[in-house]
Amino acid sequence: MIRVHLLLVAGALLAPAAAQSAGDSEVAGTTKPQSHGLLPIPDYTASSRMYLTGDWGGSRTDLAEQGLQVDVFWTQSGQSVVDGGTDKGWRYGGKLESRWELDLDRMEILPGALINMTTESRYGNSVNSIAGTVLPVNDVQYFPLTTPPEEDLLMTITELRYTQFLSKQFGVFLGKFIPLGGDLNEFAGGRGDTQFMSHPFLTASVTSLINPYSTLGAGAVWMPDERVVVTTSLYSSGDSSTTTGFENLDDGWVWSTSIRNQYQVSGLPGGMMLTGQYGFDNDFVNIEGQFINDGEFIVPLEEDTWNLFWNGWQYLHVDEKTNRLIDLSNGRTDLRGYGLFARVGAADQGTNPVNWVFSGGLGGLGVGRRQYDSYGIGYLYAVVSDKTSITGEELDDDAHRMEAYYTLAIFEGAELSLNYQYANSIKAMVPAATILGLRLRLNF
């Protein structure tokens, strides 16, 4: 059973950090016991409240038992800049995402093997272009990356990855995957579609210089025990959201290594992760370098850069205590209760405009009789280099951002989130934006 849940390790991220595993017990409310195969069998019945279309008369469970799992998500978001930013107004857009998992072990094709594929479609637009911020206030509409930004996509494959476990504790992976979402956190995770919407509350902002959304790479995952996961990966720093990725292999590389663990404090679950990333074989502007030499303007470049970030979360109260491990890969608060989260990151001051960043806040699940509603509030503070940015635009020396959300569980597989953001851009001439929004997510 340890190997069964190891694939939750590989399946959720595999760069820049690994998702956690669920050990020998079920992840609360998401899986049924099984006797073979790598992936747990989801609970598609109405009692899980996770799926709008349910079990398809039992055929969905039958497919999962044969090794095929398919999830389809439709996320719609509408936001309005009501004050500040570069413009005011309402924007609406949506994304349709499908996730396919082929458990080759369960299919008895190849022991220890799994194939993951993710497709994404996008339409409409967002307030990212008028909020005045460098990092998006709506990750759902911002990614996948396109030129021009946020153009409509009929469909693109953002993940197609092969994973092979060689033992119960060790596996390797290869292919196209999504680094975003790897900075997993119980109260501030996902990709903008389930908890917070704003990018700085989903990952450490210091990673934005070198981390693509979708890319080609390879790596390994090691689980010395059920509560500790170590992942290392090497991937292209060129984004491959709408391409195969092979044409970007000469755009530079990122080596990322992380260690994650979970623990109990007086019977309350908690966890943390530490990640280091090294970008190399690329051209990074040395913002502390000499731009004028003998009266001639030059752009000083460096071949490498680095960042380091820590992520932690801790339940302060749960309605029912449990010793089961938390599934961090689902972007949801798993236990009814509440807790704290925090992120701290630092980066190479010579090449990264963001020197260091801190974010933290509170998240929870269940409010009175609304036991399936979730909520969160977070605050971000970033220290920015006092040097000119690579675009030549004047920057402030710090930035602040706040976000709060409340998600109403409407019925099985349907959630409506109310969202508030206050985003003080690092762009010196742009006033802070106040943003109100709604997000409707349907899990078919």
Image (cartoon, helix red, strand yellow):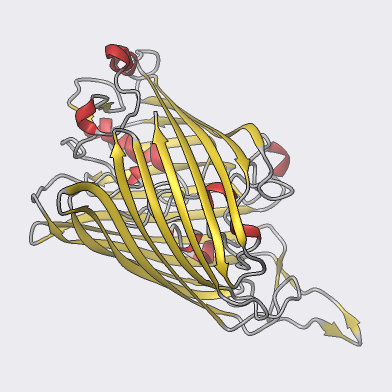
Examine the image and state in which quarter residue 87 appears. bottom right
Q: Nearer the viewer, residue 355 or 199?
A: 199
Residue at (35, 37) in percent of width and height: 414
Residue 238 or 146: which is nearer the viewer? 146
The N terminus lies in which quarter of the figure?
top left
- Of all residues, the one furthest to the right in this rendering is 295
Relative to 309, is 1 on the left or the right? left
On the image, the x and y values in percent for residue 400 come to: 49, 76
In this rendering, is residue 308 above or below 110? below
Q: Is residue 391 above or below residue 112?
A: below
Q: In this view, does 334 lie to the left or right of 379?
A: left
Q: Is residue 156 above or below residue 307?
A: above
**427 relative to 187 in the view: left or right:** right
Identified at 43% across, 43% down, the residue is: 440
Query: In the image as oriented, which residue stretches furthest toward the bottom?
Result: 294
The vertical placement of 98 against 363, above or below, is above
Residue 253, position as x, y percentages in the image: 62, 52
Question: Could one spot residue 213 in this view of the protein?
Answer: no
- Seen at 15% across and 49% down, the residue is 369
Instruction: Please indicate, yes or no, whether residue 359 appears anywhere in the rendered image.
Output: yes
- Where does the image place residue 364, in percent across and percent down from the top left? 24, 57
**Quarter residue 329 falls in:** top left
Q: Where is residue 378 in the image (x, y as percent from the top left)?
A: 37, 67
Q: Residue at x 68, y 57 (%)?
A: 281
